[in-house]
Image (cartoon, rainbow, N blue to C red):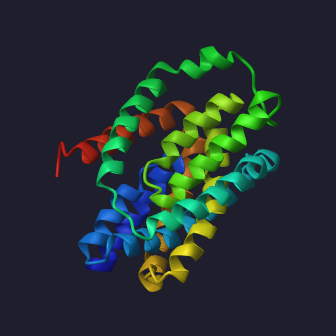
């Protein structure tokens, strides 16, 4: 029954993570409930996250939605940041961070509903960064990598907003870049957790099966339903996630 629950949670988390983010708030509490220390739950979850985001990246690329220059320019600093964040997470104490994250989720939800990036960027679409964005982007994603390596949960929302503002691409296109960057920095964070003895590999692989299936379904859903459906999923996921962090429901 435990592994059925892990598999089911993995599918839900993979689907949510591919479309937006916050799926780790399904899997992390479950792993902790099973008796894993928080750092080990955090590390074990990375096995599934890596598999899920590799699957999502491959699916988007197969559909022709792939931006290698942007992926490398933003993914490399995010990967360096994840080394810092994952080392901090080895002795993770996350109560304060969860409260802060709840506030951020509410703010980002407002931004997604009001769509200010459309006014800021107008109709400018960048498949390559230039000018100030070429400098701001890598710096921003270094800090994104620190948080991603630290706890990961909810980082997808922040990445979607940042990528939308930097590039002006649609949410489908932004999601394709997001999953690629997460795959890059998660691979390094996983190594850090593993070398420090905070990975239950078999359980992580089982969770990865569910996450990969969820990512496959999420990527196809994104391509089939488009931006409006993704926006609805993001808003709902953020509401549930913020409520969980604030303790509005069990």
Left/right of residue 20 with respect to residue 177 in the rendered view: left
Quadrant of image for the N terminus: bottom left
At 53% from the left edge and 60% from the top edge, which residue is drawn? 85
The answer to which quarter of the image holds residue 11 is bottom left
Which residue is depicted at the point 54% across and 19% down? 116
Q: Residue 88 location in percent, x, y?
A: 48, 64
Q: Position of residue 197 (x, y in %)?
A: 47, 84
Q: Is residue 220 left or right of residue 106?
A: right
Q: Residue 166, can we see it?
A: yes
Residue at 47% across, 19% down: 114
Closer to the camera in the image, 238 or 96: 96
Q: Is residue 41 above or below residue 120?
A: below
Q: How many marks?
A: 0
| Residue 214 in the image, given as x and y percentages of width and height | 48, 60
Name above or below for residue 59 compared with residue 143.
Answer: below
Q: Residue at 24% of width from left, 71% of height from top?
A: 33
Query: Along the line of sight, which residue is nearer the eye, 60 or 69?
Result: 69
Q: Quadrant of residue 3?
A: bottom left
């Amino acid at each position: 029954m435990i592994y059925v629950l892990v598999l089911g949670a993995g599918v839900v988390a993979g689907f949510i993570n591919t479309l937006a983010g916050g799926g780790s708030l399904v899997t992390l509490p479950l792993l902790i409930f099973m008796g894993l220390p928080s750092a080990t739950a955090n590390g074990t979850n990375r096995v599934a996250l890596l598999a899920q985001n590799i699957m999502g990246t491959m699916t988007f690329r197969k559909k022709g939605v792939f931006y290698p220059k942007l992926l490398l320019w933003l993914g490399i600093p995010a990967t360096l940041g994840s080394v810092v964040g994952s080392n901090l997470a080895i002795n993770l104490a996350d109560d304060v961070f969860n409260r802060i994250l709840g506030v951020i989720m509410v703010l980002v939800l407002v931004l997604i509903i009001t769509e200010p990036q459309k006014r800021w960027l107008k109709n400018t679409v960048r498949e390559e960064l230039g000018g100030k964005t070429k400098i701001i982007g890598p710096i921003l994603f270094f800090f994104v990598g620190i948080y991603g390596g630290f706890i990961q949960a909810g980082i997808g929302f922040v990445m979607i907003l940042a990528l939308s503002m930097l590039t002006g691409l649609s949410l489908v296109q932004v999601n394709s870049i997001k999953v690629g960057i997460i795959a890059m920095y998660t691979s390094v964070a996983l190594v850090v957790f593993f070398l420090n003895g905070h990975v239950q590999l078999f359980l992580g692989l089982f969770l990865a099966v569910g996450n990969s299936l969820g990512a496959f379904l999420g990527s196809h859903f994104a391509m089939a339903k488009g931006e409006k459906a993704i926006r609805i999923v993001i808003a709902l996921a953020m509401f549930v996630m913020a409520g969980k962090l604030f303790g509005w429901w069990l």
